[in-house]
Amino acid sequence: MSTSADAHPLFAAALRELGLDVPVRRFPDATRTAAQAAAAVGCEPGEIVKSLVFAADGVPVLVLMDGASRVDVEKVRAELGAQHVGRADAAVVRETTGYAIGGVPPFGHRTRTTVLADRGLLAHGTVWAAAGTPHTVFPLDPKSLIEYAGGRVVDVRERTP
């Protein structure tokens, strides 16, 4: 089993600060997408946590979503009382979090942002999230993950007809 030494240094430091000892798994192939991560881990896509950065009226916000679902941007806008919400570009993601898209963990970021965690994450006993690189993931129960992220549980999942 891998250790937190396999995590991105910024994320490994966050784990130490939190006193959190989680197994970090490193894979030779990228786990950038929820499908890739689920295949590597051997779980369902819904058990993967996507850490997505949006800009709400120009201010970065992190949305934690299960890997089988999509974010309803209109619900995020309403939740935040923002005029406009859209996906943040790669430069904003890296500047805000300290990580590249495809490796953003749910916590341990360079800056403090508002975190919205979709309620659907709570449907699983264990979820897997990026550990700061496109090749590393770690497991945690969703309630603790949301707590460590400083997230607020909301319903921002896109409903399929």
Image (spheres, rainbow, N blue to C red):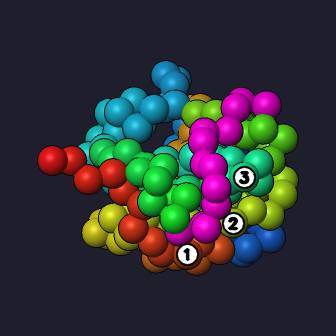
Q: CA distance from mark 1 to mark 2?
A: 8 Å
Mark 1 or mark 3: which is in front?
A: 3
Q: Position of residue 150 (x, y in %)?
A: 65, 74
Badge 1 is on which residue? Answer: 152
Q: Amino acid at mark 1?
A: Arg
Q: CA distance from mark 1 to mark 3?
A: 19 Å
Look at 63% across and 49% down and name the residue there: 84
Judge the density around disc 3: few (<14), some (14-19), many (≥20) Cα neighbours within 10 Å. Answer: some
Magenta segment, which residues?
Answer: 79-91
Look at 76% across and 48% down and name the residue there: 58
**Left or right for 106, reference 119:** right
Residue placed furthest toward the top: 29
Q: Position of residue 86 (x, y in %)?
A: 60, 42
Q: Between 161 and 121, which is closer to the camera in this rendering? A: 161
Q: Earlier in the sequence, mark 3 or mark 2?
A: 3
Badge 2 is on which residue? Answer: 114
**Tag 3 secondary structure:** loop
Q: Earlier in the sequence, mark 1 or mark 2?
A: 2
Residue contact at pointers 3 and 2, CB within 8 angstroms: no
Query: Is residue 34 shown in magenta?
Result: no
In the figure, 39 relative to 123: above or below? above
Mark 3 or mark 2: which is in front?
A: 3
Q: CA distance from mark 3 to mark 2?
A: 13 Å
Query: Is residue 80 shown in magenta?
Result: yes
Q: Amino acid at mark 3?
A: Asp
**Left or right for 132, reference 136:** right
Residue contact at pointers 1 and 2, CB within 8 angstroms: yes
Question: Which numbered disc covers residue 57?
Answer: 3
Look at 67% across and 39% down and name the residue there: 88
Look at 72% across and 75% down and name the residue there: 19
In the figure, 151 relative to 55: above or below? below
